[in-house]
Amino acid sequence: MKKNDNFAFCFLTNSCFIMCALTRFLTAFFFLFTQNAYTQVAIERFLSPSYMKGASISLMVKDILNDSIVYCYYANRELIPASVMKVVTTAAALEILGDQFRYETALLYDGVLNNGILDGNLYIRGSGDPTLGSSEITADRDKIMHEWIKSLKQSGIRMITGAVISDESVFDSHGHSMKILLEDMGSYYSQGSYGINIFDNRFTLFMQTGDADVKPEILKTEPDMPAIIFHNHLSSNTFARDSMYITGYPFSNERYLYGTIPSNRSSYLLRGDIPEPSLFLAQYFTGLLENDSIKVSGTPSCYRVLVQNNGWNNMERKFLFSSFSVPMKEIVRVTNHVSHNLYADVLLKTIGLKRDNEGTHSSFDKGISTVKNHLSQKGLNTSSLWMFDGSGLAVADKLTASFLCDLLDYMYNRSSYSDTFIYSLPRAGIEGTVANLLRNSKLHGNLRIKSGSMSRVRSYAGYYVKDDQVYAIALIVNNFSCTQTQMRIDIERLFLSLF
């Protein structure tokens, strides 16, 4: 080949290479341009209604197999996440505690056991287990306590001269974050989280209504709560919608009922929180013992009450029996599927027990510190993580869509508990709190996603899996002025347009 021919060949070859590269670049650029343009149109449509005038959103969709951002809109804006905070809590719980971790509740005694008589006290030592008698775990709420009674009988105990005492000292006595709203106190969804928890820390109040404008009658509670005084300010109306609610403070035996309910109903239900679960368990278990012919002479009590009255003793205690919760993987699944606030807050405090190996008296602050340190060590930037509880009920909680996607990316690609975490997120249109989201749409069942909602807040975080593609999704919307139902519909349209 002549020199000029060789030059011409190289020129043509390089030109073809350059043209191919340019074509690929232009194709990719055009794809990204059209995708971003389409995203912008979808977002503008989402924000266009008048009820979105004062709204703020944070959105990110990330291809976590190729480490590329697909959609992004104010992804670093810090907004209130509501229950999407549980994604952070449950991810950290799996990472720090492990998926096989179990809570232990132990029976111990002090004094002397002789000839069937326990001349001392029986202690229930808690470790924070949120599943004791939980309706999410068992249909027989008393099952575990019957096992305790069986163990006492096998030990020969027929009489206790002292009292049944709950030891909830593994956590501090602040069952609620200081950042929750006053209106949430006393409600069934804002039950406190303590070293001992029982029956989801909830009771059900049964009522009936008669003629319009006649105050509803309280029938009973389940379980029986004889210590609670109900201040009934409810009213009934023929055309009323259910607007009733219950309020009250921790450790107080007074609960206040407000609102309106329909008239002429033979049975109506309202759920509230158990004011002091540890004390209630001591009282409840004492009743079960006496019904099973084990006499108890002393008055039931708990750690907080006895310390407050200088009555707590540190006598040597002997072990009788231990019961254990379901493993952490099941607790995390329940937490995310039904958005259980008690479970999430207990998980955060349990994580706090791992801080500096302190081992006792954990708190929200200790749990938060441990979570942030752990995630930072894993390479996540936690500067935008403003965490004040584990459940997301605290209105001061703040997150960004960017942080959520980074966390979801880490849990999918690098965590040892990836499968367990993904399985804990409910499938849209099928189960949990997202059973009605995108039902019968093209995304039905293809999203594993956690939802969150409170007044003027709606949020989602999870995964979209299609064929060989996996996307992390995070969307937080604050300060809209429409109903939650309308916002869910609008978010469904947005998701469908993005995918």
Image: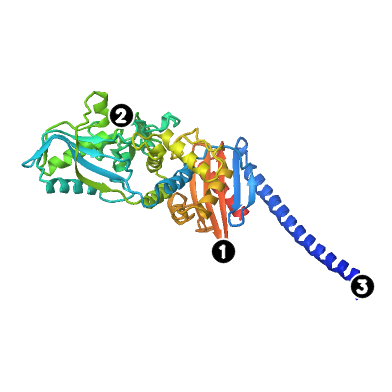
> Can residue 436 be seen in this snapshot?
yes
Q: Position of residue 285 (x, y in %)?
A: 20, 40
Q: Position of residue 242 (x, y in %)?
A: 39, 38
Q: Secondary structure at mark 2?
A: loop
Query: Dividing the image into 4 quarters, which one contains the N terminus?
Result: bottom right
Residue at image coords 67%, 45%: 44
Q: Nearer the viewer, residue 411 or 245?
A: 411
Mark 3 vs mark 2: in front: 3
Colour scheme in the image? rainbow
Q: Secondary structure at mark 3?
A: helix
In space, the residues marked 3 and 2 are separated at their CA atoms by 94 Å
- The residue wearing badge 1 is 467
Looking at the image, is mark 3 or mark 2 earlier in the sequence? 3
Q: Residue furthest top?
A: 309
Q: Is residue 223 above or below residue 251?
A: below
In space, the residues marked 3 and 1 are separated at their CA atoms by 49 Å
Give the residue type at disc 2. Answer: Phe
- The residue wearing badge 3 is 5
Mark 3 vs mark 1: in front: 3
When asked about the image quadrant of residue 313, the answer is top left
Q: Secondary structure at mark 1?
A: loop
Asked if the residue under mark 1 is in contact with the one under mark 2, i.e. CB atoms within 8 Å, the reply is no
- The residue wearing badge 2 is 251
Query: Dividing the image into 4 quarters, which one contains the C terminus?
Result: bottom right
Q: Nearer the viewer, residue 413 or 249?
A: 413
Say left or right for 335 vs 253. right
Q: Nearer the viewer, residue 35 or 304?
A: 304
Q: Is residue 101 above or below residue 128?
A: below
Q: Position of residue 298 (x, y in %)?
A: 14, 31
Q: Position of residue 420 (x, y in %)?
A: 43, 55
Give the residue type at disc 1. Answer: Asp
